[in-house]
Image: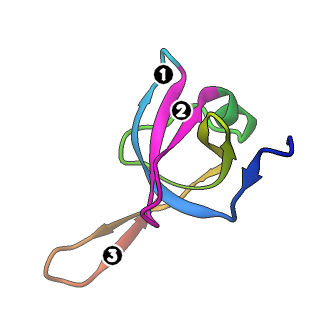
């Protein structure tokens, strides 16, 4: 990491889109900060093949002069809520 790069602590967010042909996508952080780019080479380095819009992820943000990039990605388990019942079921 160069002196101009800065890394954040873990954050969570939702994948807005991911283009498998181009190998690039965007994650919107839950904390309201600017979206960040995610690249297929980083996915593969983290043991992931691809992402789909709506996927929930935990990651770190590397801030470079060119923008914000997601690193150290991990998928979060989905939670489906039953409307009006207050229950939840966890899925992988």
Rendered image: mark on residue 7: none
| Residue in the foreground of this view, choosing between 17 and 64 | 64
- Of mark 1 and mark 3, the one earlier in the sequence is 1
Task: Residue at 59%, 39% (x, y): give it.
Answer: 67
53 w.r.t. 78: above or below? above
With 24 as the anchor, is 66 left or right in this view? right
Rendered image: mark on residue 20: 1
Task: Residue at 64%, 36% (x, y): give it.
Answer: 43
Q: Secondary structure at mark 2?
A: loop
With 85 as the anchor, is 87 left or right in this view? right
* Residue 21 position within the rendered picture, expressed as x and y whole percent measured from the top left: 48, 15
Q: CA distance from mark 2 to mark 3?
A: 26 Å
* Residue 31 position within the rendered picture, expressed as x and y whole percent measured from the top left: 46, 67
- Of mark 1 and mark 2, the one earlier in the sequence is 1
Task: Residue at 43%, 48% (x, y): give it.
Answer: 55
Badge 2 density bin: few <14, some 14–19, many ≥20, Cα 10 Å: some
Report which residue position mark 2 lands on: 50
Task: Residue at 47%, 33% (x, y): give it.
Answer: 25
> Does residue 66 show up?
yes
- Which segment did they paint magenta? 23-40
* Residue 63 position within the rendered picture, expressed as x and y whole percent measured from the top left: 66, 47
Report which residue position mark 3 lands on: 88
Q: CA distance from mark 1 to mark 3?
A: 31 Å
- Of mark 2 and mark 3, the one earlier in the sequence is 2
Q: Is residue 30 magenta?
A: yes
| Residue in the foreground of this view, choosing between 34 and 43 | 34
> Does residue 72 show up?
no
- Contact, mark 1 vs mark 2 (Cβ under 8 Å): yes
| Residue in the foreground of this view, choosing between 67 and 44 | 67
* Residue 34 position within the rendered picture, expressed as x and y whole percent measured from the top left: 46, 52
Q: Secondary structure at mark 1?
A: loop
């Amino acid at each position: 990491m160069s002196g101009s790069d800065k890394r954040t602590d873990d954050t969570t967010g939702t994948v807005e889109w991911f283009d498998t042909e181009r190998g690039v996508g965007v994650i919107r952080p839950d904390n309201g900060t600017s979206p960040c780019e995610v690249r297929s080479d980083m996915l593969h380095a983290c043991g992931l093949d691809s992402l789909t819009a709506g996927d929930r992820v935990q990651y770190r943000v590397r801030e470079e002069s060119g923008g914000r990039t997601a690193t150290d990605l991990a998928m979060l388990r989905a939670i489906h809520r039953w409307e009006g019942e207050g229950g939840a079921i966890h899925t992988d």
